[in-house]
Image (spheres, rainbow, N blue to C red):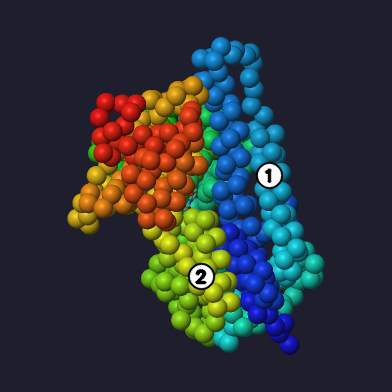
Amino acid sequence: MAEQYDVVVIGAGPAGYHAAIRAAQLGMKVACVDAALGKDGKPALGGTCLRVGCIPSKALLDSSRQYWNMGHLFGDHGITFKDAKIDVGTMIGRKDKIVKQFTGGIALLFKANKVTPYYGFATLHGNRLVKVKLHDNSGHDGGEIELTGTNVIIAAGSDSIELPFAKFDGDTIVDNVGALDFSEVPARLAVIGAGVIGLELGSVWKRLGAEVTILEALPDFLPAADAEVAKTALKEFRKQGLDIKLGAKVSRTEVVGKGKKKEVVVTYSDKDGEQSFAVDKLLVAVGRKAASKGLLADDSGVKLTERGQVEVDAHCHTGVDGVWAIGDCVRGPMLAHKGFEEGIAVAELIAGLPGHVNFDTIPWVIYTEPEIAWVGKTEQQLKAEGVPYKTGSFPFAAVGRAVAMGEPAGFVKVIAHAETDRVLGLHLVGVGVSELVHEGVLAMEFKGSADDLARICHAHPTLSEAIHDAAMAVEKRAIHKAN
Ligand code: NAD
């Protein structure tokens, strides 16, 4: 006899745990199933984001930034030191402790909200029947359990895309999971893909002393970002010594040697023809795909798109009565916070409330140094769409707080509609912009204008003044630069 719930959520990542907790808050009886295991082999909630994504990468980005600043920023402040050493084990241990704190935190939140967790692999069958193959160490001694939900929310997440000529071996050729756990700083690291993961994890190991080469197949750097932001970021990354090769298509990799002498020979072609080089580790970061393997039984009725994503409408409904899907396994950007919002919206829709996600105001952040962040449309997009617009920019080099911090790189750009002045986009590259971007999100959500941003009092001295002056620059009235 199947256990009956109001809602069964498949996946306890950012999308799934938000959906489960919100549904429980709204008075529903909720179960949430997750198959993932932590580094210690025990069930771990929180999905890619908490276990092997957002949180651990931010921990290592912060550790590596401290080390990098010692060598590159402290001298200007008159601080010198001798014999700085990196203990990679301690650094990884710190990261693992943070991960455990947060994955354990989800279990506590489930308990507090009376969400029942099941630790095992779930497959959705017809009539919203979910069969779960339980882990042996899940507290259920293995075996299978059946759950039925009046509603089922699929939040199965995503997996790294593997290249046929660079198969992950968990040692020399790795994905984001492996690159978060190197036991020492690789002398030479190659990265395939100058996307978000490649840039963030490439930065971590570069700052710790690795020689890092990033091979990007596309001729343009970060084409989804504003072109000027991407150009500035590329210049800064190259200044830091990241060797970013654009238009570089990898065709072969070969692991050679044994033990300490093991290396990967990477062969790629670019405008100069075919070239090869050897590295100690290779990170493949060429995107992620929906985790749909084994998820849907033939009788589930749920369809997959051509790209293998669970097919949904604008409200995350699959078209099968009572079955919804959210997060990385459906269309839209693979961002934890997009999953958060979809999870909350679907729980509210199930409860008969007006749940909604505004895809036009989802912020993007790349946690490199300088950080990159944006919300809304880029100039390229507006040009292509024929929308008349005006812009105002302001450099951090003219922002007192940024200069005092020794972080003058980058700028802020406000894009507004040429006629209505409504904010259409905010694009930032520089220190702390992961936090600043939300001013743009707020302005866009409230249908604000560049003039609104220009007339809001910003504390001095803060980094946010860059937004204030950029907004004023839209009408050529920035105070701290020649317009
Ligand atoms: P991505 O899509 O951001 O970047 C992949 C890059 O690899 C692209 O630039 C692509 O052109 C390039 N590429 C693809 N095939 C290639 C090949 N054969 N040779 C060379 N280059 C190739 O993907 P990602 O960096 O793997 O990240 C995966 C997902 O995780 C993304 O959707 C991203 O948004 C998400 N993520 C987000 C954050 C964040 O928000 N800060 C952090 C990490 C991951």
Is residue 378 placed above or below 357 in the rendered structure? above
The reply, left or right, for residue 253 in relation to residue 417 is right
Q: Residue at x 76, y 71 (%)?
A: 142
For the residues labelled 1 and 2, the Cα–Cα distance comes to 32 Å
User: For numbered disc 2, what is the local secondary structure?
Assistant: loop
Q: Is residue 156 visible?
A: no
Q: Nearer the viewer, residue 56 or 480?
A: 480
Kind of residue sitting beneath label 1 = Ile
| Rendered location of residue 41, percent (x, y) | 72, 55
Q: Residue at x 42, y 71 (%)?
A: 314
User: Looking at the image, is mark 1 or mark 2 earlier in the sequence?
Assistant: 1
Q: Residue at x 52, y 49 (%)?
A: 175
| Rendered location of residue 205, percent (x, y) | 53, 34
Q: Nearer the viewer, residue 458 or 173?
A: 458
Query: Which-is-in-front pick, marks 1 and 2?
Result: 2
Q: Quadrant of the C terminus?
A: top left
Label drawn at residue 153:
none
Kind of residue sitting beneath label 2 = Gly
Is residue 456 placed above or below 150 in the rendered structure? above
Quadrant of the rendered structure where residue 143 is? bottom right
Quadrant of the rendered structure where residue 426 is? top left
Q: Is residue 65 visible?
A: yes
- Number of labelled discs? 2
Q: Residue at x 76, y 64 (%)?
A: 111
Is residue 301 placed above or below 118 in the rendered structure? below
User: For numbered disc 1, what is the local secondary structure?
Assistant: helix
Label drawn at residue 98:
1
The residue singled out by tag 2 in the image is 355
